[in-house]
């Protein structure tokens, strides 16, 4: 089982990045899993950024990213995305994706670094 994040990098404030998280080896169809993005800044706890459910594709966002970030998924490609616009320095963190089937069946990716600085 693997979740592999990509797309991180260093951008200036106001810039954009698109993160991807590709899943493989899941015992159940990717479409069965709720998918989330979390982030962890240095010295802070990991926090939930956005979730997209399955089925239905309902989305939820942390207040700090509403209107700037968009989570989406492509079940045919076993991939979830996080489009991040109007980035701020406080968005700097390691971003992780998480796949959840139930409370006893979930997976984490290894993370991708996002830095926002002028």
Image (cartoon, helix red, strand yellow):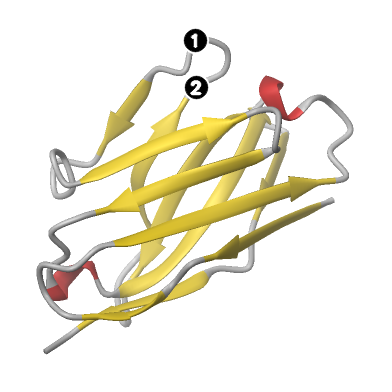
Res. 77 image quadrant: top right
Let me know if residue 12 appears in the view.
Answer: yes
Residue 48 at x, y = what percent?
Answer: 36, 47
Left or right, 17 with respect to 75, comes to: left
Q: Residue at x 54, y 52 (%)?
A: 97
Residue 102 in sight here:
no
Residue 78 appears at what percent x and percent y? 70, 38
Q: Tell me the element at label 2.
A: loop
Left or right for 16, reference 29:
left
Above or below for 11 versus 19: below
What residue sits right under mark 1 in the picture? 56
Q: Quadrant of the C terminus?
A: bottom left
The residue to which callout 2 is attached is 53
Density class for disc 2 (Cα within 10 Å; few <14, some 14-19, many ≥20) is: some
Picture quadrant where residue 76 is located: top right
In depth, the one of 74 and 116 nearer the eye is 74
Q: Is residue 26 left or right of residue 94?
A: right
> Percent x, y for residue 87?
17, 64
Name the residue located 25 percent from the left edge and 63 percent from the top edge: 16
Seen at 53% across and 33% down, the residue is: 73
The residue tagged with tag 1: helix, strand or loop? loop
Tell how many labels: 2
Categorize mark 1 by other alpha carbons within 10 Å: few (<14), some (14-19), many (20+).
Answer: few
Query: Circles 2 and 1: CB distance less than 8 Å?
Result: yes
- Counting from the top left corner in percent of width and height, residue 25 is at 88, 45
Identified at 17% across, 86% down, the residue is 117
């Amino acid at each position: 089982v693997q979740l592999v994040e990509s797309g991180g990098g260093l951008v200036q404030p106001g810039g954009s990045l698109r993160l991807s998280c590709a899943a493989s080896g899941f015992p159940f169809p990717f479409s069965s899993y709720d998918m989330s993005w979390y982030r962890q800044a240095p010295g802070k706890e990991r926090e939930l950024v956005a979730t997209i459910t399955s089925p239905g594709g309902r989305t939820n966002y942390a207040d700090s990213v509403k209107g700037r970030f968009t989570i989406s998924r492509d079940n045919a490609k076993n991939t979830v995305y996080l489009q991040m616009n109007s980035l701020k320095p406080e968005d700097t963190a390691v971003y992780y994706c998480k796949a959840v089937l139930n409370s006893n069946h979930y997976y984490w990716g290894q993370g991708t670094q996002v830095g926002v600085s002028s």
